[in-house]
């Protein structure tokens, strides 16, 4: 298979879970809408056929979840043959993939691959804000210290009313209706807004907020480099990886990282933190907003917390084989209390980690249910130059015997954000983690 460019299974969400409309530049829009040559149309048809055959032959479930795959081809192939632009062609291919109604299927435009060697991938700069849906409102739940949003005085708890020309409450309602029965609805809603808070270096975005006094205020926020360092995995477009470790009050250690990726850089820092926190009463491992990555890293991290000999945490299922995921303990595992913070943006390998911590009774989960997007995926390059991400493996929890796909991992203790607390600069989920450790450490 000459066009295969990545041949390891990963647990990560790199693209939107469904094709949600997003803003793109006028230049990109013009390029996507240029009339195709006969050769380009031929490559798109070849790409469609390759996608259809690959899913048929390699998806972990040979019954394809009950989808009539032949009927989908019969319906959509004539459309791809007639498509006159790249955007129209990609839309048809995404319709084919979306008919599976599961995560980790997507098309990555070829332009993304041209930016692989850039330390500053275009369109990946951020405002330094994270958002969540709270009581039907899009609220700022985190401001990265020193970021553009921080410098412009944006505060947690502020409601986003408008981004550029887009009315966010209206768009939220539209997407909610479009995805009323979609398994990953709440994750997609956040992702649809978060994607509008990224752009190119040197550009900025106008955002209208409802501030702490319930008054509308417009703030112009420049896009700036994300925190962390750029990393690349196979032919996945560059993205930034970071890890934070610190000692916080009440003799508790804190670890947070944004993806289970770049093990050569991330794992030594995680391992050092576990050594430094060995005498602490508790450790909080924060995977809120973690986009996933390599399942092997999750088992390696859990090895620091396992008091007994090797144990199985779950099973990865492929078309023709099953792989038991085994956790092997460290020589001197940590024996204090552990809390794992999760939310609806904890995706894929982050869910793999949370589920294993729960199944093996290694930690107490606090926050909100995870995304339910756990299918292991491959990424290949299509004949037309686009990337093609497809699910090839499923993960089954040991304790329930069920897949996490579309279900997610529920916390032991569900704690939602509240606007009044966010406006006070409080993180109720983190506070609950500290309280739980304090009550149970002895």
Image: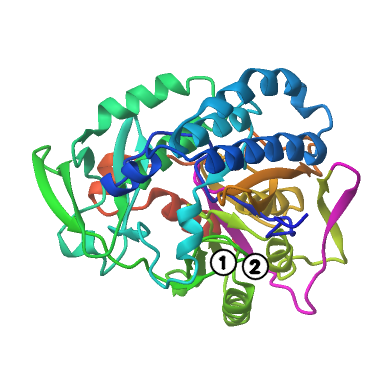
> What's the residue at 62%, 42% (across, down)?
104
Q: Secondary structure at mark 2?
A: loop
Q: What range is drawn magenta here? A: 319-347
Above-or-below relation of 420 to 156? above
Residue 29's x, y, as percent? 33, 42
Q: How many marks?
A: 2
User: Quick one: quadrant of the C terminus?
Assistant: bottom right
Question: Residue 340 has which mark?
Answer: none
> What's the residue at 56%, 43% (across, down)?
39
Disc 1, disc 2: CB below 8 Å? Answer: yes
Q: In terms of image quadrants, where is residue 296?
A: bottom right
Q: In terms of image quadrants, where is residue 327?
A: bottom right
Q: Earlier in the sequence, mark 1 or mark 2?
A: 1
Above-or-below relation of 64 to 330? above
Residue 281's x, y, as percent? 57, 70
Residue 41's x, y, as percent? 55, 37
> What's the residue at 35%, 56% (across, down)?
123
Q: In terms of image quadrants, where is residue 107?
A: top right
Q: Does the magenta segment cover residue 324?
A: yes
Q: Does the magenta segment cover residue 329?
A: yes
Measured Cα–Cα span from mark 1 to mark 2? 7 Å
Q: Secondary structure at mark 1?
A: strand
Mark 2 lies on residue:
336
Mark 1 lies on residue:
283
At label 2, counting other C-alpha atoms closer than 10 Å, the crowd grade (few under 14, some 14-19, many 20 or more) is many
**Of 93 and 159, the residue lying toward us:** 93
**Of 77 and 96, the residue lying toward us:** 77
At label 1, counting other C-alpha atoms closer than 10 Å, the crowd grade (few under 14, some 14-19, many 20 or more) is many
Q: Does residue 425 appear in this view?
A: yes
């Amino acid at each position: 298979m000459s066009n295969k460019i990545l041949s390891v299974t990963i647990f990560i969400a790199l693209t939107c879970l469904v094709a949600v409309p997003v803003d793109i530049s006028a230049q990109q829009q013009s390029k996507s809408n240029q009339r195709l040559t006969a050769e380009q149309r031929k490559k798109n048809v070849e790409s469609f056929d390759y996608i259809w055959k690959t899913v048929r032959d390699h998806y972990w479930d040979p019954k394809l979840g009950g989808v009539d795959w032949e009927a989908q081809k019969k319906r959509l192939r004539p459309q791809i043959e007639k498509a006159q632009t790249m955007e129209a062609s990609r839309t048809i291919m995404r319709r084919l993939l979306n008919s599976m109604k599961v995560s980790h299927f997507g098309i990555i435009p070829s332009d993304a691959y041209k930016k692989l060697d850039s330390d500053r991938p275009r369109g990946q700069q951020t405002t330094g804000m994270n958002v969540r849906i709270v009581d039907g409102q899009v609220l700022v739940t985190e401001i990265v210290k020193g970021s553009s949003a921080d410098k412009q005085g944006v505060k947690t708890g502020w409601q986003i009313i408008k981004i550029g020309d887009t009315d966010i409450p209206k768009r939220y309602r539209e997407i909610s209706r479009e995805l009323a029965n979609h398994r990953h609805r709440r994750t997609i809603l956040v992702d649809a807004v978060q994607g509008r808070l990224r752009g190119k270096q040197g550009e900025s975005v106008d955002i209208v907020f409802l501030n702490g006094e319930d008054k509308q205020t417009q703030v112009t926020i420049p896009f700036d480099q994300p925190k962390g360092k750029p990393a690349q995995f196979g032919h996945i477009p560059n993205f930034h990886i970071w890890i934070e470790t610190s000692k916080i009050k009440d003799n508790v250690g804190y670890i947070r990282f944004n993806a289970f990726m770049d093990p050569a850089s991330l794992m030594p820092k995680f391992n050092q933190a576990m050594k430094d926190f060995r005498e602490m009463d508790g450790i909080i491992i924060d995977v809120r907003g973690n986009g996933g990555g390599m399942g092997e890293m999750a088992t390696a991290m859990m090895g620091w917390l396992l008091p007994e000999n090797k144990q199985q945490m779950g099973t990865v299922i492929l078309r023709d084989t099953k792989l038991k995921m085994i956790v092997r303990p460290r020589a001197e595992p940590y024996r204090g209390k552990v809390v794992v913070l999760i939310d609806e943006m904890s995706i894929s390998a982050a869910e793999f980690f949370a589920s294993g911590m729960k199944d093996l009774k290694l930690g107490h989960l606090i926050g909100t249910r995870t995304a339910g997007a756990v299918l292991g995926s491959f990424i290949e390059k299509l004949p037309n130059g686009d990337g093609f991400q497809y699910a090839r493996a499923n993960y089954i929890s040991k304790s329930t015997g069920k897949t996490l796909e579309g279900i997610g991992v529920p916390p032991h203790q569900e704690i939602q954000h509240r606007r009044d607390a966010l406006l006070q600069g409080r993180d109720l989920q983190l506070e609950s983690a500290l309280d739980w450790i304090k009550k149970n450490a002895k």
